[in-house]
Image: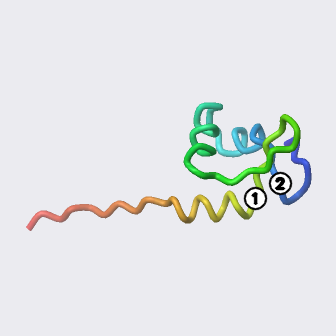
Amino acid sequence: MNSISKDFMTKTDVMEEYSISKNTIYRWFHRGLPYIQLGGTRLVNKKDLKDWFDSNRVVQSETIDH
């Protein structure tokens, strides 16, 4: 992992950690995943990522037929 520090991940780190594509990480940014732009590098705070996951979680319930 090429993390800048223990608190931040590069977009590539996030892509590798969660096995997602470049399109997916950019879609997450577009949907509000917070990041810091440092030159040409986008950094994601690990706590912000966890909070964003928690706030965007979708819970589905099963429909029970009676």
Residue furthest to the bottom in view is 66
Residue situated furthest left in the rendering: 66
Which quadrant of the view contains residue 7? bottom right
- How many numbered callouts? 2
Q: In the rendering, at what x and y percent does residue 9 appear?
A: 80, 49
The residue at which mark 1 appears reads as: 46
| Quadrant holding the N terminus | top right
Position of 38 with respect to 21 (left or right) is right
In terms of image quadrants, where is residue 39? top right
Query: Residue 17 location, x and y as percent?
Result: 71, 45
**Which three-letter amino acid code belongs to the residue tagged 2?**
Phe
Mark 1 or mark 2, earlier in chain: 2
The residue that mark 2 highlights is: 8
Disc 1 to disc 2: CB gap under 8 Å: yes
- 57 above or below 11? below
Label 1 packing within 10 angstroms: few (<14), some (14-19), many (20+):
some
Q: How is the image coloured?
A: rainbow
Residue at the spot x=59%, y=31% of the render?
23
Q: Residue at x 51, y 59 (%)?
A: 56
Q: Quadrant of the C terminus?
A: bottom left
Residue type of the residue flagged with mark 1: Lys
Q: Outermost residue, top direction? A: 22
Q: Secondary structure at mark 1?
A: helix
For the point 35% across and 60% down, the residue is 60
Which residue corresponds to the image point at 18% horizontal and 65% vertical from the top-left?
64
